[in-house]
Amino acid sequence: MVERKKIEIPADAKVKVSVGPEEKFPFDISPMYEGERIRKEDMFVELGGPKQVKFELVLALPMDQVEDMKVTLVGPDLDEMKEGESYPYGMLYYIAGSKVETDLEPVIERRNHDFQNYIEGYMHLNQRYDIWVRISKNAVKKGLKSLIQIAKATMMLYKNELPFIEKIEAVYITDKNLVEKILKEIAMPIYDERDRRVETLHDEDVQEFYSCTLCQSFAPTNVCIVSPDRPSLCGAITWFDGRAAAKVDPEGPNKAVPKGELLDPIGGEYSGVNEFAKRESGGEYDRIKLHSFFEFPHTSCGCFEVIGFYMPEVDGIGWVHRGYPHPAPNGLTFSTMAGQTGGGKQVKGFLGVGIAYFRSKKFIQADGGWYRVVWMPKELKERVAKYIPEDIRDKIATEENAKTIEELKEFLKKVDHPVVKGVVRKVDGKKITEGWPEVVEVKEEKVEAKPEVAAPAQAPTAAVQPAVQAVPTAPMPIPAMPAFQLPMPMPSQQAAPAGIKLIIKDAKITIGKIVLKKKGEK
Amino acid sequence: MTAIAVTGKGGTGKTLVSALLIHFISKKSRKVLAVDADPDSNLSDALGVEVERTLGDVREIFQVSRDEMGTMNKEQWLEGKIYETICECNGFDLLVMGRPEGEGCYCFANSLLRGILRKLTRHYEFVIIDSEAGLEHFSRKTIDSADYVIVVTDMSKKGLATASRIKQLVKELKLNFKDIMLIANRISSEEAEKRIREFSEREKMKLLEVLPYDERVVELDLKGLPVVNLDESSEVYRRMRKVAEVFLKG
C-alpha cells in the first residue's frame, strides 16, 4: 500500500496559506447549481480539462497531522490568471477523524464533485486524473478572487455533510511541475491500488452487499444482489458502484443489504440476503446462494450478458453470450434460453450472469467453478481467457471444437476434461461429480441387448449416460417452466427413427439402466 | 426552462423548423440547448455546425469499457463524457443523441443518463428537441418532458396521419405538456390551407403557423447548405421568426 503522508512543497514554490473558516462567500452554495454547464463564452478560466495536467485526491491521515480548515495554494491564484486560458490543477485533501479509514478515501473523494458543483459559477466534471473545472466570468464579477475561497467552501460542505470528518485540510496546486509530480508519484499509484481492490476485495471482507432493483419494471420478482465477488447480471454494476449509489440515494434502486449470518460459505448463502430477497421479491423465493449454479441460484432478470446451461449428457456447464447467434451444443440459442430463464425466476440448470462474474474467484464455486465448465463461444472465451485457470483453459471447448453434444463428448474425452472422471471442487477438495460411467461397459451391454441395431451403437451409448449420472446433488436441471421441451439428443434420435418427443415437467429422474429395444422385439 | 419538442413524419420539414427555432431563440437567449433526437435527421447540418461524437457513441463506449473502470464512479464518468460531447456552438449548445441502443442491457446506462440529462437541462432557458415521430427518447424517459410539442406536417395523407398518431402517443406518454401545436409546411394553395385548418380544428391542435413552399429552402437543401443561411427575403424565414417570438414571450 502506498504510504499516506503529507506532500512536500518545494521551498522555492510560490505559496499562499489561509487558516480558519471563511465568514462569507461571494457566491451562492446550493444543490440547484448541480449540472450547470459553463459555456466557453461565459468562462473566465478553465482548470484541468482536456489540455492540462490535473488530479484530485483525498488522503486519510492521523488526527495530529491534519490542521483543520487550512488551505495551501501552490502556484498562481485566480487574480494572476488570464481570462479565457486553461491551467494545471491539483486538489488534495487531508482528512482525519476517528471513523475515517483509508478505505473511505475514494468515497469521500467522489463527493468533491458534488460539493464543488453546489458552488455557483463553478463547474466540476470527471474524477481522478481527468478533472475538468470551469469558473464563470460572472462568479469573478460577483467577487470571487481566490481558489482559497473555493477550497474553504468545499471543506465547509465536507464537514457539514459528512460529520465523521473531524478535520480537513486542503492543498490546491496550479503549479504545473508540482501537479505533474504529485500525480505521478502519489495519485496514480493510489488510483491503481484502489482498482486492484476490485480483484482483491471479497465477499468476506465487507459487511454489506448492495441490491439492484432497476430491472423490476419488467422482472418484478428480480433482486440482483451485488457483492464484491458477484457483479450484477447486466454487467453494469459492481459492489463499488452499489456502494456509491446507496450512499448518494439510500432509497434508490441500489440499497445496502446487511449480510447477516453466513449460512453456506461455499455456496455463498447469507441470512441477510435471504431475508432481503424474500421481502423484495414479494415472498416469491426465500433463499439465494450467490455462487451456486444448481442450488437456490441467483434469479435471472433478462438483462444478463451470458447464460449458463447445464448439459446432463456430459455433466458439465456451458456458457453462451448475447452476441453468439448460433445454437449452443444443447441445440438452443442464447435467446431461446434467455426467454425461458428471464423474468426474475430461479431456474435450476440455467443461470444468467454478467461477463465480469467470470473474473470472480468464487465463480460458481459450489459446483466446481471453472472445472465444471465444458463449452463457451470462442469470442467469449477469449474475452475472459486470463481469468480461466491455466490447467483447464485448453480443456474448455468452443464452437471450433464442438457444435453438438456428440462432438463435445469426443472433445472432452480427448482432452481428459475433469467432468469425464469427476470434478473435484477446488474450494474444499470435495469430489462433487462421479464422472462419466465406463463407456466400454455400457457399450457391451447395449450390443448384447439389441444386436440388430449394431450400426448406430456408438451413438446411443454416448447418449445414454447423461441420465445415469445426472448430478447426484441436484435434481435434473429442468426449468420449472410450463412444458419445456428439451431438445436433448436422446437415444430415440439415433436408435428409434419413429421420433419420440419427451415433455418433462418438474421431474426428478434417476435411472439405473436403459435398455432400448426395437419394435416387436422381446 | 422551457422544453420544445419538434416532431412529425420524416421529410415534412421538421428539421427546418427546429433549426430556425434554435436560430431565432438563441439570438435572444444565451442559454439554449439544441437536442438532435432523430437518428435519421441531421440537425447539425441544418444548423451548419459539426459534431464529433454523439451520446449514443458515449453510451456504447460506456457499455464496452465499464468492466475496466475499476473503482471509478461510473455516473461521473458518463457525465463527464456527455459534457465533452456537447458541442459548444455559436450561441447555443448542441447534443446529438445518435444511434439507437445495441444489444445488451441498457437499464443502468439509461438510468444514469436520465439523471444526468435532467440535471443538465434544467440550467438552460430553452431546450429544443428535434425528435423522430416515434418519440423514443421520451418513451424511454431519457428526455423527461416537453412543455410544448410542435408537430410539423405537410399536406400528404401520411404526414397528417402521423400528426394524429403523435397526438395520441404524446397523451399516452404523459408528457405533461402545456400545449400540442401544428405547423403546416409547403402549403402552396388556399385550398390546402383550408384543409389544414379543418384538420387542426378536428384534431384540436392549434395551428401555429402555415409555411409556404419556398424555392430558397429547396435550393439550400439541394446544395446541402445550412437552412440558417436563409434571410429576410424568405417567407419561411420571416414566419418562423414570428413563431420563435411566441415562445420568447412565454
Image (cartoon, coloured by chain):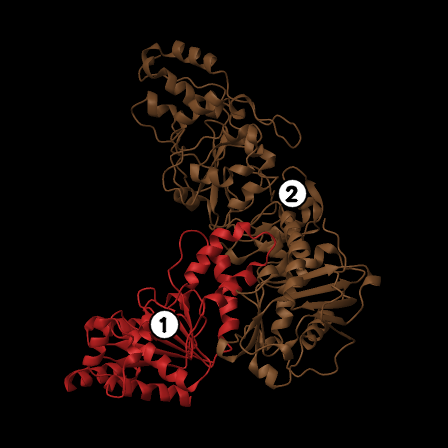
Residue holding disc 2: A269
Secondary structure beneath label 1: loop
Residue B203 visible, this angle: no
Expressed as whole percent of the image width and height from the top left, the position of residue A374 reads: 48, 31
Image point (19%, 82%), residue name: B195
Instruction: Tell me the number on the disc at residue A55.
Output: none
A327 or B228, which is in the foreground?
A: B228
Q: Amino acid at mark 2?
A: Glu
- Residue A214, image x, y percentages: 52, 58
The furthest residue to the right:
A64
> Which residue sits at x=22%, y=82%?
B196
Which residue is label 1 attached to? B49
Above or below, A36 relative to B236:
above
The colour assigned to chain B within the rendered structure: red
Indicate left or right for B156 with B52 as reference.
left
Instruction: State the image coordinates of residue A323 (x, y, percent, origin top left).
Output: 40, 45
- The image shows residue A419, relative to residue A60, as above or below, that is above
Q: For the residue marked with disc 1, what is the amino acid? A: Val
Estimate how packed mark 2 is, as few (under 14), some (14 to 19) or many (20 or more) residues with alpha carbons within 10 Å: many
Is disc 1 surrounded by few (<14), some (14 to 19) or many (20+) residues within 10 Å? some
- For discs 1 and 2, the disc positioned in front in the rendered view: 1
The image shows a total of numbered marks equal to 2
Extreme residue in the front direction: A12
Which chain does the residue under circle 2 lie in? A
For residue B225, say whether it is visible: yes
Q: Is residue A392 above or below residue A135?
A: above
Element at label 2: strand
To which quarter of the image does residue A423 belong? top right
Image vertical order of residue A4 relative to residue B19, above or below: above
Q: Position of residue A105 (x, y in %)?
A: 70, 58
Quadrant of the drawing holding the C terminus of chain A: top left
Chain identifier of the brown chain: A
